[in-house]
Image (cartoon, grey):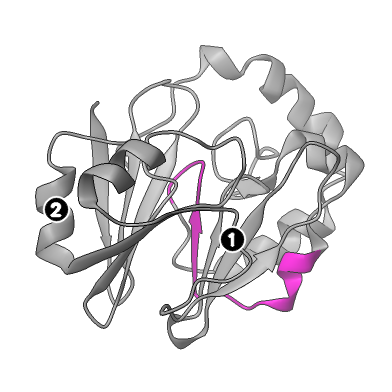
Amino acid sequence: MSVVCRDVPGVGIEWVSAEPDFMGRASCALVAEGDVWLVDPVDFADLDVTIAALGTPRGVIQLLDRHNRDSAAIAKRLNVPHLVTPREIPGSPFEVVAVPAMAGWKEVALWWEATKTLVVAEAVGTPRYYCAPGCSLGVHPVLRIVRPPRVLLQFAPEHLLLGHGFGLHDGATAALTAAVSRARRELPFVLPRLFAAKRHRYPLES
């Protein structure tokens, strides 16, 4: 699997998979005092070497019940726990936050206070089909209708890492506030992008 990987200084790394080319499937590895926690990982050829260079792997965290991706296989290979929508993560600096959505949708987010990092799997994202024109972040199209993720507004992140699209590391709080507060108003502008999603490749290089 081809990916583009980026450093997030003081936090870890993030990477986005080239396939499916419109979806922008994103993963991250958080590094806390030499411990590495992988979040919703998509596998790639040099993953094990990359993680070893960061520190000691401690666990694979799956933030969305249906975000299976390669989490189980990677956890088995690295000999670490595979934590699926956990209530807490003992031995880590992360606060687990439930993201209420709808029946059949179980999602949690991570808040890392020391680095002001928020990690969100599905509720918000940066691909084109998430965002209204001119916006850097948007709410998942379904949640725009049923339940915008207002629970995320309790945080003021400096880093916003995502399960879809590269994260935001400049103006993350403002973008999150705008995305959630305008979620329903922007829906008419997002729907055409959603229907045309597969015609637009996610830009892996800025």
> Which quadrant holds residue 17?
top left
Q: Earlier in the sequence, mark 2 or mark 1?
A: 2
Report the residue marked by disc 1: 86
Residue for point 29% across, 38% down: 205
Is residue 187 on the magenta stretch?
A: no
Residue for point 33% across, 27% down: 18
Residue for point 50% across, 71% down: 89
Is residue 162 on the magenta stretch?
A: yes
- Tell me how far mark 2 sits from mark 1, CA to CA: 25 Å
Question: In the picture shown, does residue 54 fall above or below 22?
Answer: below
Count of all numbered marks drawn on residues in the image: 2
> Which quadrant holds residue 192?
top right
How packed mark 1 is, by other alpha carbons closer than 10 Å (few <14, some 14-19, many 20 or more), is some
Q: In this view, does 20 lie to the left or right of 182?
A: left
Residue segment shown in magenta: 151-166
Q: Can residue 42 be seen in this view?
A: no
